[in-house]
Image (spheres, rainbow, N blue to C red):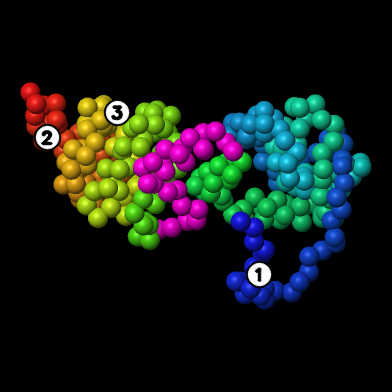
Amino acid sequence: MLRQLQPNAFSAPASEFAPGPVPMLQWIEIEKLVVDESYQRDIGKRGAMNVRQIAENFDWSKFAPVIAAPVEGGCFAIVDGQHRTTAALLRGLSQVPCQVVQADRAQQAAAYAAVNGNITRTAAHQIFHAKLAAGDPLARELFDACAIANVRVVRRNLSQAKMKVGETQCVGALTRCLQTYGRDTLVTAPQCVTETADGNPGFLRATIIDGLCAALHERSDWREAGGTLLSVMDSFSFPDAWGEVAGDLEKVFPSTGRSAFRDKVLDHLSRHEMSLPTRAAA
């Protein structure tokens, strides 16, 4: 679905409109692009990973123009785009598209701070939908598994209190569990939440998803128990279990929280061993 931009949803700016000289768009030789170390950061370990990722998956449709300003010697100081320009250089390219702005060093530094400090961070669940639209195989596999479990990855940020049954933002946990435990476990685990009690809206959280998947992976007999599993989990209180685990989450590593929730699920299942069809037959 396509839509036009909707400025009417925002109040008009109150400040004076003084955007400065109109920038020019042009291709510039990479050898003429320089980094002003007085305000630019070095490419650290995390930045190097970003450079390698851009280089490995280089695509002009993903390459935003580099923002640069003229400096002495016929060069241009990179205001924004050091990482992607380095990646282009690694690919053997000699030129990159640039948006050339007229700015002195102070203005360059201010622009650098504004560009890197005022970014609207794209959440993982929003990136997931972009990948899905792009035909990413893993995103499609995850979407299909979630559809079977009646789980929906929301498109916008929501508080847990506003989540409906089956809604979640925890695409990272879902992806991790799909890759670690497989499709069958990922399909069954969320159903323990959404198809018990009142559907437990707001409780498809990363710690819970991880803990459930780990428990059902360890106890595949319960994972394959179908309606019996859901009947037993109907008496498991996710709000109470979450309340007991969440109080310590800020003090422990996430993996510890996941393990604690897994243990609670395993303990609950162990108290209903006789409900398993194979055990009842024995």
Mark toward the start of the polypeptide (1 vs 3) = 1
Report the residue at 78% width, 65% height from top. 19
Residue ID for mark 3: 217
Q: Nearer the viewer, mark 1 or mark 3?
A: 3
Please, what secondary structure does the residue beneath circle 3 have? helix
Circle 2 packing at 10 Å, graded few (<14), some (14-19), many (20+), is some
The N terminus: image quadrant: bottom right
Please, what secondary structure does the residue beneath circle 1 have? helix
Q: Nearer the viewer, mark 2 or mark 3?
A: 2
Left or right of 77 on screen, residue 166: left
Residue ID for mark 1: 7
Name the kind of residue labelled 3 in the image. Answer: His
Measured from the top left, where is residue 234 in percent x and y? 19, 46
Mark 1 vs mark 3, CA separation in Å: 49 Å
Q: Is residue 230 visible?
A: yes
| The image quarter in which residue 63 lies | top right
Residue stretch in magenta = 135-159
| Pick the front one: 172 or 107 | 172
Name the kind of residue labelled 2 in the image. Answer: Ser
Q: Nearer the viewer, mark 2 or mark 1?
A: 2
| The image quarter in which residue 118 lies | bottom right
Q: Which mark is residue 275?
A: 2
Mark 2 vs mark 3, CA separation in Å: 19 Å
